[in-house]
Image (cartoon, rainbow, N blue to C red):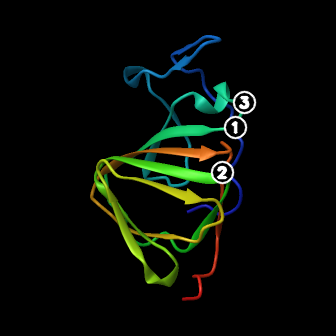
């Protein structure tokens, strides 16, 4: 996992954009660099269309998490995750472990310490963050 704020990346063109909408076609997917090298991050065009106010991406992995990410926070107002397939286990303060799986969603306010501790062998999720430039910083485990 990278620490510090996310790097500013020039956003590639999405399939179609007008003053009324942005359309990101699956068969014309645009991938961007993300926090983890073993995942694919499909840009949905929202970052550019919202002038950086919101980021929306489809994140996919064809292998499971080999070790926990370590405790970290995201530097943002909030992060919404919607699981399309597979599952992710997250640990929060007090040792609370939550599994989000296909069809589940979770909102994590910015600055909330958490640790991704396990995933299914493959998964796909939609992640939305406000603002688009969501940094990640390691942190100490929260006191129980």
Q: Earlier in the sequence, mark 2 or mark 1?
A: 1
Q: Assess whether mark 3 and mark 1 are in contact (beta carbons under 8 angstroms).
A: yes
Q: Is residue 136 above or below residue 72?
A: above
Task: Report the disc number at residue 129.
Answer: none
Task: Report the disc number at residue 53.
Answer: 1
* Residue 126 occupies quadrant: top left
Q: Give the residue drawn at x 57%, y 16%.
A: 21
Quarter of the image where the N terminus is located: bottom right
Q: Is residue 136 above or below residue 117?
A: above
Q: Horizontal and vertical percent for residue 142?
A: 59, 82
- Res. 66 visible in picture: no
Q: In what element is the residue under mark 3?
A: loop
Identify the residue at the far bottom of this view.
Answer: 144
| Label tally | 3
Q: Horizontal and vertical percent for residue 53?
A: 69, 37
Q: Horizontal and vertical percent for residue 6?
A: 68, 51
Q: Give the residue drawn at x 55%, y 21%.
A: 14
- Res. 93 visible in picture: yes
Q: In what element is the residue under mark 1?
A: loop
For disc 2, the neighbor class at 10 Å (few under 14, some 14 to 19, many from 20) is many
For disc 3, the neighbor class at 10 Å (few under 14, some 14 to 19, many from 20) is few
Task: Report the disc number at residue 51.
Answer: 3
Q: Earlier in the sequence, mark 2 or mark 3?
A: 3
Q: Give the residue drawn at x 68%, y 44%.
A: 131
Label 2 – label 1 distance at C-alpha: 10 Å
Front disc: 2 or 1: 1
Task: Report the disc number at residue 134.
Answer: 2
């Amino acid at each position: 996992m990278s620490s510090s704020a996310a790097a500013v990346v020039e956003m590639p063109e999405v399939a179609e954009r007008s003053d009324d909408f942005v359309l990101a076609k699956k068969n014309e997917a645009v991938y961007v660099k993300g926090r983890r090298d073993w995942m694919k991050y499909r840009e949905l065009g929202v970052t550019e269309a919202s002038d950086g106010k919101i980021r929306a991406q489809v994140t996919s992995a064809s292998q499971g998490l080999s070790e926990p990410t370590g405790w970290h926070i995201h530097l943002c107002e909030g992060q919404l995750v919607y699981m399309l397939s597979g599952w992710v286990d997250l640990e929060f303060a007090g040792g609370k472990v939550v599994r989000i799986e296909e069809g589940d969603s979770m909102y994590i306010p910015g600055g909330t310490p958490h640790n991704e501790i396990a995933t299914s062998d493959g998964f796909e999720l939609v992640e939305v963050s406000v603002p688009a430039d969501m940094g990640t910083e390691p942190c100490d485990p929260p006191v129980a």
